[in-house]
Amino acid sequence: MDQPAEASRPAGPEALQVQVRSFAGREIVFDSEGFLSDFRQWTEEVAQTLAQESGLEALTDTHWQVIRFLREYYLQNGRAPLHRELKKGTGMSLLEIESLFPGGIKQGARRLAGLPNPKTCGQS
Amino acid sequence: MAEIVYLDNAATTFPKPREVLERMIDLYAAKGVSPGRGGYDCAQEADELVYGVRKRLCQFFGGDDPDRVIFASNATDALNLVIQGSIKPDGHVVSSQLEHNSVLRPLQHLREKGLIHYDLVPFDGEGFIDPDDVSRAIRPQTQLVVLTHASNVLGTIQPIETVGAVCRDKGVPLILDTAQSAGVIPIDISAWGVSALAFTGHKSLLGPTGIGGLVLRQSFEVQPTRFGGTGIDSQELIHTQTYPHRLEAGTLNILGILGLMCGLDYLAAQGMEGILQKERALARKLWEGLAAIEGVKLYGAARWERRLGVVLANIEGMSPADVGAILDGDFGIATRVGLQCAPLVHRSLGTGRAGGVRFSVGPFNTEREIDQAIEAMAQISRS
């Protein structure tokens, strides 16, 4: 993984803090909180790197189960699952998901799955 | 849909009393024509109903002229109208760091257009502004003081009577945002020296969303910021200067106004004081329960005689967004997490961008629900 670099995105208050990072020769844009700017730029390598950076040595099958559910749901519905849908779809409680990822649900599971940073104030 | 424990009443009360909703719909079905726009009897009756609600609101808030009760969509809409309609170029405004974006953003908009300057007074560690700070911030150029009556984040009730006396002495109009307090705390703008009050109908007034407004004192003039049909002075292309139509353009939200009337009737029947005491007792129980949990941090003062039923909390080491998600997904408890549209409050509290978990009690919450919320927070905190 390469070092983060300053992006040259259009002006805007948040754009100033955007980072562009290189993964396997591809430039990938992250927002100021480390969320992918474009869901489609996600790769398994991205998830693994973000996981290591957050303190996880490796992503287990359980982690992948959550990540894959989030991605498939987002792809099909154009939004993140509701809390009850996340529980049903993963077969886990939200408390379990919170414990599973070092960053918790939002900064952990959602960010590693490449879902956009929610605009809604306080949304997980 | 599964039942939820609803603790987001500071956003909107939910559920609304069924009798309010049913009566509102019955009245709308019978009288829901365009009020004051036609000569037929039903239009006249609808107009009378609307005027009756203006009179009720004028009396409810201690106003001095029912024609100066102006309907708007909500408190934000009303605040935009009164701020933009009363400020003059090169003016100065005093407000506070406790404000909701409904005040901060109109002020910032006017500042960025180069029309005004503003200063925001701070709040203390308990969540109260100091009237002396307001007095010191007022300059010769100050045209308005705009303050919230009760913080939507901390629930703290501000010393408005004292601020009103300061504003009266200095000859500066005081605009009061009562989004959180209207319907739960008695308000008397004439006695308090308030020039204009903004309210919303869908919180403690127990009406539907989409209705709110202003109550203006006779001594306080507001210029129209929107123009159009009013049903009077139609021969003129210039918008009428007659209150209340001067500040109301287009067909009124009669469904919302009727719902607001039904909400006022409900409050009168139930007694506002009883509702306030119930909400305070539940919030106090919640506060004390949360305070006993290791790792839970609470904000503001536990001075319940000066607080509404709002409790802001965080769990050490956890994002409030995740705490809110777990409360909802695992425990069926609805709260409001994040900044609650009051970013400067969180900046002052040190809760930054993430904010906190706000529990806000309403008239229909129960002790059992509060116990559920405490137990849920305890389980999350232990995890």
Image: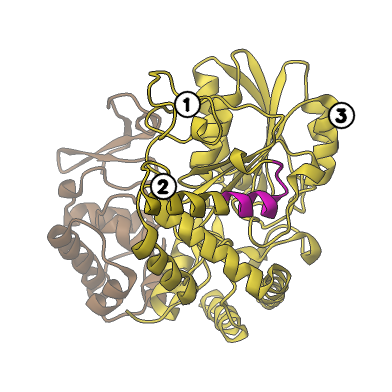
Residue B57 counted in the magenta span: yes
User: From the viewer's perspective, is residue B297 above or below residue A21?
Assistant: below
Specify few, some or many for label 3: CA neighbours under 10 Å numbering under 14, 14-19, or 20 or more: few
Foreground tag (3 vs 1):
1
Foreground tag (2 vs 3):
2
Residue type pointed to by label 3 = Asp
User: From the viewer's perspective, is residue B376 above or below residue A56?
Assistant: below
What's the coloring here?
A: by chain
Residue in the image at 31% along x and 55% along y: A111
For the residues labelled 2 and 3, the Cα–Cα distance comes to 40 Å
Q: Which tag, 2 or 1, sits closer to the chain's start?
A: 2
Specify few, some or many for label 2: CA neighbours under 10 Å numbering under 14, 14-19, or 20 or more: many
Residue B324's spot in the image, x, y percent? 47, 66
Position of the C terminus of chain A by quadrant: bottom left
Residue in the image at 52% along x and 55% along y: B201
Name the disc covering residue B169, or none.
3
Residue type pointed to by label 1 = Thr
Residue B70 visible somewhere in the drawing: yes
Residue in the image at 38% along x and 59% along y: B31
Q: Could you say which is closer to the camera, residue B185 or residue A75? A: B185
Task: Check disc 2 and report the residue beneath it.
Answer: B35
Task: Check disc 1 and report the residue beneath it.
Answer: B225
| Mark 1 chain | B
* Colour yellow, chain: B
Residue A87's spot in the image, x, y percent? 30, 77
Q: Which tag, 3 or 1, sits closer to the chain's start?
A: 3
| Mark 2 chain | B
* Colour brown, chain: A
What residue range appears in magenta? B54-64
Residue B168 counted in the magenta span: no
Total label count?
3
